[in-house]
Image (cartoon, grey):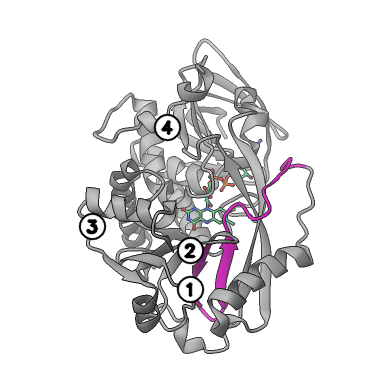
Amino acid sequence: MNNEFDVIVVGVGGMGSATVYELASRGFLVLGIDRYNIPNHMGSSHGISKIIRLAYHEDPSYVPLVRRSYELWHRLEQMVDEKLLVQTGTIRGGPEHGAMFSGSLKACQIHGLAHEVLDADALKRRFPSYTVPSGTMSVVQREGGFLLSEKCISSYVFAALELGAHINGRERVVNWEPTDLGVKVETDKGAYSAKHLVISSGSWVSSLVPQLLEFAKPEKQVVGWFRPLIPELFTIEQFPVFGLEVKQGRFYGFPDYDGRGLKVGCYHHFNEQVDPDDFDRAVSLNDEVLLRDFIGQYFPAALGSTLALQTCLFTNTPDGHFILDRHPEYPQVLLAAGFSGHGFKFASVVGEIMADLVEHKERDYDLGLFKLSRFLNN
Ligand SMILES: Cc1cc2nc3c(=O)[nH]c(=O)nc-3n(C[C@H](O)[C@H](O)[C@H](O)COP(=O)(O)OP(=O)(O)OC[C@H]3O[C@@H](n4cnc5c(N)ncnc54)[C@H](O)[C@@H]3O)c2cc1C
């Protein structure tokens, strides 16, 4: 293999796989490198399913990006002839003035998204699986659903390889340095050069970009799958993906897909910041109890046996918004980082944005929210 490329992408997870594809589709000679299997269970993008939703309480300016993501996911589905996005609708519920409900409602109103508002009784009548406190308000938005995340990565990899991209799994980038013509990248198996470098290495980003040490912090999460006692209440037809803000925290969940059980997680879980290369990936009884207690209280008809528990990593920025920008010193190096537990749905559009940055191409999206200067200049 010739060791010179137009672009090298470090990390072929959610963001990297889409970026490699997008660059290859624009005619760039690309090399994607990942230290583990592609896809793997070591970073953030595994766990079978990831929620996609337009009712975006985090900031309404995400909505145009989600819309574009939907288009690109559907394009990928057509390219590989695979179902990758399962539409179930989404429910975002909580106290009337809590961020989950009021922010989701605001996003629907600002962007003219068809939606319904249900109080606790109306929610129970429509979705009998819910047992929520009176005073809980919910926004129902029918375009929400989930992506089959590992399949999305494999699909982008397949499509990129078809276009002539090079993709190396099980090869770790140990260093990179700027050169007159671009960058030189050193791995545990060899050395490569390229005109541009995209760093999409998830929870490991600060080992390659030390400037991000304080701004992209890995955090351990645990999600679980549980056998419903009344399965017909939790099918993809009957049970939209949800986010629920309750006194114990912010939880999210998915219908029983493919007989795997109801999937539930608690956003930020136990707030455990970790070193991705040195932490206990094992799941404890406390992890399981947190999730089972939530299900027992709010979805009692789902509290059958525990089927599976899995560890995953968030990479949090201080404000919860992503970093999509150039390296502060080397403009030929681009960063896609800090996806703060809500990035997967955007992977398709992030691929497009990173390729645009390589090409110095601008679109209508407002990317101001994602600039690195918001941290470095303060
Ligand atoms: C439990 C959980 C639930 C989530 N739920 C949702 C959800 O419902 N909806 C949603 O939109 N988002 C969700 N997210 C967030 C989403 O999964 C992440 O934002 C997204 O997967 C981040 O993708 P990434 O490409 O940055 O990271 P990853 O997919 O982890 O990819 C990074 C890759 O870089 C590789 N790498 C690292 N260092 C090196 C190196 N030195 N050399 C070579 N390769 C390297 C790693 O092996 C890895 O494969 C969730 C996350 C978790 C943990």
Disc 4 Cβ-to-ligand 1 distance below 8 Å: no
- In space, the residues marked 2 and 3 are separated at their CA atoms by 20 Å
Question: Going by the picture, which residue comes out furthest to the front?
Answer: 135
Q: Residue type at mark 2?
A: Leu
Query: Residue under circle 4?
Result: 370
Coordinates of residue 138 in the picture (x, y in percent): 37, 66
Question: What span is colored magenta in the figure?
Answer: 251-277
- In space, the residues marked 2 and 4 are separated at their CA atoms by 26 Å
Mark 2 / mark 3, whichever is N-terminal: 3
- In space, the residues marked 1 and 4 are separated at their CA atoms by 35 Å
Q: Is residue 274 above or below residue 51?
A: above
Tell me which residue sits at (35%, 42%) in the image: 25
Query: Residue under circle 1?
Result: 132
* Number of the front mark, 2 or 4: 2
Query: Residue under circle 2?
Result: 244
Asked if residue 191 can be seen in this view, the reply is no
Q: Is residue 45 above or below residue 193?
A: below
Within 10 angstroms of label 4, few (less than 14), some, or many (20 or more) residues? some
Query: Residue under circle 3?
Result: 113
Residues at badges 2 and 1 in contact (C-beta under 8 Å)? Answer: yes
